[in-house]
Image (tube, rainbow, N blue to C red):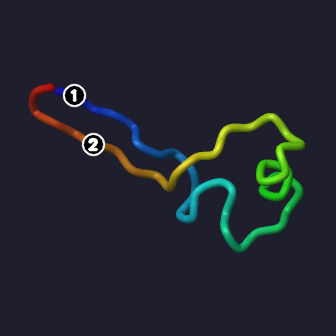
Amino acid sequence: MFIKVLGSAAGGGFPQWNCNCANCQGLRDGTIQAAPRTQSSIIVQRQR
């Protein structure tokens, strides 16, 4: 079985498009060290 995590952030991902908190804005501006993340999702396959 093959399981891959495609995203691990909240429903809107990180940064959220409609959020101006210090973390989301800092990621957009490049002033914090963080990686953008997509919304939570996985893929599960019987074989790779």
Name above or below for residue 16 compared with residue 34: below
Which residue is drawn at the image coordinates 57% and 64% (left, top)? 12
Furthest-bottom residue in view?
A: 18
Furthest-left residue in view?
A: 46
Q: Secondary structure at mark 2?
A: strand
Whether label 1 touches label 2, CB < 8 Å: yes
Q: Secondary structure at mark 1?
A: strand
Q: Hey, which quadrant is residue 19 in on the image?
A: bottom right
Name above or below for residue 11 compared with residue 2: below
**Mark number, residue 2:** 1
- Amino acid under label 2? Ile
Q: CA distance from mark 1 to mark 2?
A: 8 Å
- Amino acid under label 1? Phe
Which residue is drawn at the image coordinates 10% and 27% (left, top)? 47
- Give x and y (percent) for residue 42: 34, 44
Name above or below for residue 13 compared with residue 6: below
Picture quarter with the N terminus: top left
Q: Which residue is mark 2?
A: 43
Q: Hey, which quadrant is residue 2 in on the image?
A: top left
